[in-house]
Image (spheres, coloured by chain):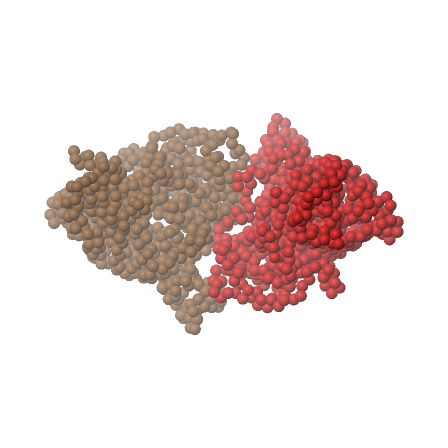
Chain colours: A brown, B red
Amino acid sequence: MGESAPRKDAPAKVTGRAQFVDDLTLPEMLYGVTVRSTVARGRIQRIRFDPAFEWDECVIVRAEDIPGRNVVPLIADDQPCLAGQVVNHAEEPVLLIAHEDRHMAESARRRVKVEYERLPGVYSIDAALRADAGAPFKSYTVAKGNVEEGFRRAKWVVEGEYETGAQEQLYIEPQGVLAVASPREGVTVWGSMQCPYYVQRALAAVFGLPEEMIRVVQCETGGGFGGKEEYPSMIAAHAALLAWKSRRPVKIIYDRAEDIAATTKRHPSRTRHRTGVAPDGTLTAMEIDFTLDGGAYCTLSPVVLSRGTIHAGGPYRCDNVRISSRAVATNHPPHGAFRGFGAPQSIFAMERHMDRIAKTIGMDPAELRRRNFLRQGDTTATGQVIRERVELPALLERALAESRWEEKRRTFAVTNGNGNVRRGMGIAAFMHGAGFTGSGERHLRSQVAVEATAEGKARVLASSCEMGQGSKTVLCQIAAEALGTKLEDVEIAQPDTAEVPDSGPTVASRTSMVVGKLVESAARDLRRTLDQSGLLEGRTFSEACRELVKRRGGFKSWSRYQPPPGQWWDDDRYSGDAYGTYSWAVQVAEVAVDLVTYETSVTAFVSAQEVGRVLNPALAEGQVEGGVAQGIGLALYEKVVYDKGRVVNSQMTNYIMPAPGDLPPIRSIFLETPYEFGPGGAKGLGELPIDGPAPAILNAVEDATGAAVARIPMTPEDLLDALERTHE
Amino acid sequence: MGESAPRKDAPAKVTGRAQFVDDLTLPEMLYGVTVRSTVARGRIQRIRFDPAFEWDECVIVRAEDIPGRNVVPLIADDQPCLAGQVVNHAEEPVLLIAHEDRHMAESARRRVKVEYERLPGVYSIDAALRADAGAPFKSYTVAKGNVEEGFRRAKWVVEGEYETGAQEQLYIEPQGVLAVASPREGVTVWGSMQCPYYVQRALAAVFGLPEEMIRVVQCETGGGFGGKEEYPSMIAAHAALLAWKSRRPVKIIYDRAEDIAATTKRHPSRTRHRTGVAPDGTLTAMEIDFTLDGGAYCTLSPVVLSRGTIHAGGPYRCDNVRISSRAVATNHPPHGAFRGFGAPQSIFAMERHMDRIAKTIGMDPAELRRRNFLRQGDTTATGQVIRERVELPALLERALAESRWEEKRRTFAVTNGNGNVRRGMGIAAFMHGAGFTGSGERHLRSQVAVEATAEGKARVLASSCEMGQGSKTVLCQIAAEALGTKLEDVEIAQPDTAEVPDSGPTVASRTSMVVGKLVESAARDLRRTLDQSGLLEGRTFSEACRELVKRRGGFKSWSRYQPPPGQWWDDDRYSGDAYGTYSWAVQVAEVAVDLVTYETSVTAFVSAQEVGRVLNPALAEGQVEGGVAQGIGLALYEKVVYDKGRVVNSQMTNYIMPAPGDLPPIRSIFLETPYEFGPGGAKGLGELPIDGPAPAILNAVEDATGAAVARIPMTPEDLLDALERTHE
């Protein structure tokens, strides 16, 4: 561990041997397509099938063909697999068609016309909050101390309102599933996904079958970022329903336009801050109101809201905090999991707000943060006592030094008078909880196994999914170290519910830390068995494994999640140890704003973080660079445009993501403080880096131009507007 | 029927929707390769695996891994799936390797070295006939009249010896199979093949499983020509054995070199003729000795020999006939089924011999044939009474007229003195029995069904395989006519042992005639049901089918083979009605021989045939053109070169087939005399056209140059030799 070991998944991907779902072609296979609602809310009145088309060649599935429950079960179980009488969002699946010719399937889809009675829809957080719009999917209140008392102690009360837009995950491989299904054999699906056991549970409900009759196999997956957490259950159900009815294998692969328009995106948000600040700049009270647009169905909104809520107060000590939050229903396509899971939204607000406070009270924004950082022994907003040393001051100093903060700020103050380019520096400090929130991990009871194989390898069995982030490599590194052998002796199974135990979903920055810990424990157990049996005497590790299998006819070590000692959580009061631990970071962005085109470029970026021990430096840097790039997209480029609830820019030509030329050099700095309960001292890292870029960049834009933009993505038009307002 | 209806298989093939086996890619699939013997006969002493290779990544199957019997069951059950201690021919499978990377599998294959103790081998018919070489696989004697008496009545006794070489089928798609297998689920294979039920039977033996646990699916098949009659059982067993051991799907696809070197080819032959001829040119006695080189294992040699034997006497009346024949064992890779199935070999000899007789007695070769043609009421060599009118005289006149026989012969006699090109005309007359020999069809008890489908179609269910010849189209045409509906209302299932009944193998010119008759009968039965139920009143055919399915929950008409009335066969005396009926043909070849390069070009070709009623003229012409082209290859180009029993020209760069530029205009003439027991009056056509080109061409070469070549293929070198001998 600690070495940049070569990726376990690389040889298969480089040689083309890796199987993505669209590489599979089964005998007699059909291609499935989805007829989707063209309106955001309406009642289906009639479905017309173009009589000129050969419908006999197609298999068609409607809601009434579903053998079990018409639901994609998740939290509220409110989302149907196929719309019944009513549609609640644009692109909602209405019926399914399969044809043996991919192009004819698409042609068939275009020849179905669904007629609707349009109903009024809700397309904004404001509209959703009006009294008559119905209850939110979920709301939370987090309270600590006495906010009124805090405000009384304040010299300044600073208010602000911040908004973030939807964001598309833009994984390189669009969603896709291949299914075979029959009443006798049950259902088997192969697909691009993060959470095979979620898909298994969903299919069991849709087909009314026991879970043992559902087999879910993760194919090589070209990126997920949360977008393949809940939606694969929907596609899997669709493909399997077509397979069930046609008695033939059915593959559904979305193209980019369908994927962008129909699948989940990051929840848009609005956050209001009211903060009391003492004369010395310490925070005396924080009142935060946080709202997410959940879209038309509940999906994961309660848990996204939860993480956003818990992170809304930032990494700051404050005795008096009240956070109120809610996820509201609109008629947008449901929003869902996306790297950061609510935290980038509320952290954007907190960190922009910190700059507003700094400006209000006339303090350097770095200094304001430094004075308020959480320290060992402090409690977070949920009352969690921070037991480890908090490295934020050190991270801040490193980030400032590396970005030449002071020097550049002085220089820019002088040079910003010249020409049409304005330069500025911005900062963001934040933490990110690793693993499931509250008692989530306790309920999951994740399990992994490490087995000795007849071929003389140790093999990790877990449902955690490689999707480019490097989890296969890291889990093998952990196992190899625990086994005291070399990485070549360790392999890892492809997730397949028929073969691997449920190690939980591949989300929430939990794979290295939580699943890795289980792998470490199971691997140590296998090592102990080898040691105690004396099999390693005079044998290589590989020979010893072979011999173990020969003698015992196979050997598996199991390990099941145990919460770290002393962790408590009160789900009713939303209070306690929200996460096993946190990772910490300070990021600094340097920007250049062109006052002719109003384009903003990020010209340099420093990300300093403390994520416990770094297991694989190359992969960790990759996580940071990817997260920063995605955060730059969130800040400046990636704008989902809706027209009456329908995404109208579903192509990569009009939904713009940052390309390599749009990215600055990204400097990653890791301060390593081993975490006692992580494997080899590691904590979670996957989400952390996307939390900070947006506020750091908009802070830098304000530093450069004076424009206090409070909404992302900030397009050149938004900046022009803001500058005009600033100059009025 | 009688129309050139468009091909049923064309849309899927043209759009790329058709699935050939190599289009399929199953999850977790491995690629299989075969380690083959490098010697023709030997004892395996040791197998070395290159220690530098990662064998852990491979699955290896040897003979001892076979769960059932180590045999490819066919007739003698002598051929192992994988060699045990001894190999009997070069390229005999020794062990199997699978790897998930196609290229690594091939690399692994090259890193296995099998060491042999070499044993002496048998590489020619002469060597095989020596007393110590062991018994032949099979021998027959067909006798009629009194041959000695016949020779006594003769004015001339003409002797000759003729030889034919091996020939490769050169289907456009090499052999390939994909298999999944497990003790619980049984074995399923998809492959390129002609006879799914043969493969089922073979796998049942290899795995020791009941046939119900073996499912065989024919994929789209790019040509067979007999080469996919028996060999797919071998590959299927190999792929399934690898799948059984690895518990993963395994695909084996041969490349061209492996396919040419290892799989079956046309049996080489030697035929000796001794013929008594009366003063008027009538044949008084025929003594024929016919030998096939069966290769190292029996495979289908007994039945190939049978057809070759029965056709050896040509379409000629002769009261005194004795044919002795045998298929001998050599150490060549086993020879097997190839379009014509022994008949092209013995017909080559008969028709070259007729020209030798004509030359000997000074009679025009057309006239000699005309005088000796079988007529209605005559008996063949096996004593079969020809009950139908024999159109040979009319076919001869049409062929001569169309080829301008008389005129060209006169012209060439004059012009052959000029320059370096010699031109000539050659003729061949022959018959070909349709369907299985003797009581074969009776034993097969083929079955087909025609079902009404819920989509309003009639669907033909048969195991007969489309492989480019157009059987799907013709069987649907037959069904449509019997149903009294249009072709679009009829579809046909892809052969799959789990779905279609056993309508016998797709061989022996039996599909249109024998299986087509069953389809006609089953379709008539379905029509009767529709008529009697009154469902057709006021409904289209399609609506009536739908209604029938709705009322009865599905409907299938079955039909099982019944021999034509009065057919008898004595298998012990090899006497009786060898075939239900015969098709007849006369072909005329015109050639140009270049006396500088000794190359022979076929410059014009006429094929006149009587095959009963022609069901689809475009497809029938396709059969004739393809057969003639393949016959031209047999005559002049396609030479398999062995070195100690090993094929050394296994590439299409050194095994030469005629390309389009090597082919003459081919003129097809059909005289239609409906056959009472064929569907719509049709007889078999698939093999007939390949019987005549080789003798017609070599007769034409003799006409042009005087060189009496008796061996095919006749290369330029062979012709040079012969001309030098002629001029000595």
Q: Is residue B5 above or below residue A176?
A: above
Q: Is residue A141 above or below residue A501?
A: above
Give the image quarter of residue A75: top left
Residue, far top: B538
Give the image quarter of residue A516: bottom left
Q: Tell me residue B126's x, y (percent).
A: 73, 60
Give the image quarter of residue B325: bottom right
Q: Split into 4 quadrants, where in the image is the N terminus of chain A?
A: bottom left
Q: How many marks?
A: 0
Is residue A479 visible to us here?
yes
Side of B348 where A155 appears, left or right: left
Residue, far bottom: A538
Q: What residue is shown at x 19% (from left), y 35% (from top)?
A: A725
Q: Is residue B645 above or below residue A236?
A: below
Side of B405 where A460 appears, left or right: left
Q: What residue is shown at x 29% (from left), y 35% (from top)?
A: A124
Q: Tell me residue B391's x, y (percent).
A: 77, 38
Q: Is residue A246 above or below residue B137?
A: above
Q: What residue is shown at x 16% (from left), y 44% (from top)?
A: A415
Is residue B683 visible to us here?
no
Q: Split into 4 quadrants, where in the image is the C terminus of chain A?
A: top left
Q: Tell me residue B696's x, y (percent).
A: 72, 44
Q: Decide which of A526, A252 is in the foreground and name it.
A: A252
Side of A247 where A629 appears, left or right: left
Q: Tell me residue B179's x, y (percent).
A: 55, 52
Side of B673 where A689 appears, left or right: left
Q: What residue is shown at x 78% (from left), y 48% (from top)?
A: B356
Q: Decide which of B175, A373 is in the foreground and name it.
A: B175
